[in-house]
Amino acid sequence: PDGGQEKKVFAYEESGQVVGELAVLFRAPRAATVKARTDAVLLSVDRCSFEACGGRSEGSMARINQNPDALLASGAAAGVAAGFNAPIAGIFFASEVVRPGDDNSLDLTTRLLAAAVSAAVVQSFLPGGPAIKTTNFSWDGGNGELFLFIILGVLTGMIAYGYKKIVASSRDIITWVTDQGVPNIWLPIAGALVTVLISLLTCARVQFDGFGAVNEVLRDASEPLGEAASNLSLAPLIENRGSIGLFGAAPLLALMVLKIFSTAFSSVSGLVGGTFAPSIYIGACLGGALGRMIEGAAIAHSAATTYIVVGMASMLAANCSVPITSVVLAVELAGGAS
């Protein structure tokens, strides 16, 4: 038994009784220990043999009903494909996160089919091309620029670690608050108020509106920093949305920090949310800040928009432990790379 759970004891005294059937029927983990008091004859059967005896060969579609992992992986692939208009990333996401224990060509086929159909259905109702609008996503700096991308990777790893620590600390604070007798019903209200306050201070740039906020960062970075703008000025945060060439490194880093805190507090207070989409925005702000800081540098370098897309992929990989999915998703969202 786990922890302090009550120990349950069953007796198997009659011939023909079975134990461990959940493992072969539903792929459940081991949950019991059997000890024989006298000599006994035990007949065992593994899962593949059991399924073959039941008429479920490896190529049979009926086998899917006995493999919940395959169905879960297919659902995950379809969800990412539909939510982000990225069917290929959905397939990789299912493989990296769900990891069916008995992965084979049939399971891969179901993921391919689910991702393709979900993406096609969404596109039929919501056409519009790539979710992220950038026309300058290319690697122009050559091999000499690699160290800058390595620096970006190290920074995203550190930020992802800090984000997780902030979430853990926020959860501890919420636990302490509830221990003081504050009703749980007030927690989502407090989370909503904090989010709304931060949103008002930044002209709604930290709230999730699809990829609108990410596209705004990309659109602003598509032009060099204006003469009147500065990497250190926070004034653009209160400007109306839709700016071009105004956001320097400081306001982008401020947006990143505010997004981290608002996401963490919203998550632990019980509001609906996750880590996937916020990671994309956090990475975009960090990548954009680095891209802005090297503008005008003597070394050859790519446009700031490239650093934004790479930052998105890097942060998503660090926060969600899906490195392959992150790269593929960033390329799909941006409509390709050159």
Image (cartoon, rainbow, N blue to C red):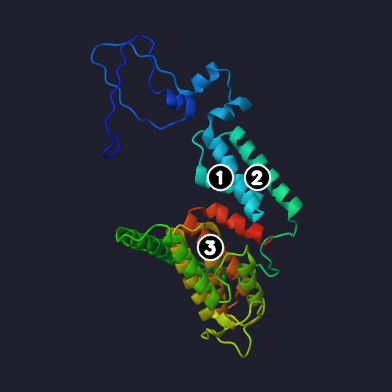
Decide which of 294, 234 is in the foreground and name it.
234
The answer to whether residue 156 shows anywhere in this view is: no
Please identify the quadrant where the N terminus is shown.
top left
- The residue lying at 48 percent from left, 25 percent from top is 25
User: Dot 1 surroundings within 10 Å: few (below 14), some, or many (20 or more)?
Assistant: many
Left or right of 305, for residue 320: left
* SS under mark 3: helix
Name the residue beneath numbered marker 1: 94
Name the residue beneath numbered marker 3: 278
Residue type at numbered disc 1: Ala
Q: Earlier in the sequence, mark 3 or mark 1?
A: 1
Q: What is the x, y in percent for residue 146?
A: 54, 68
- The residue lying at 30 percent from left, 26 percent from top is 33
Vertical placement of residue 247 versus 41, above or below:
below
Using the image, tell me which numbered label, if any, was put on residue 115. Answer: 2
Q: What is the x, y in percent for residue 262?
A: 47, 67
Residues under labels 1 and 2: Cα distance? 10 Å
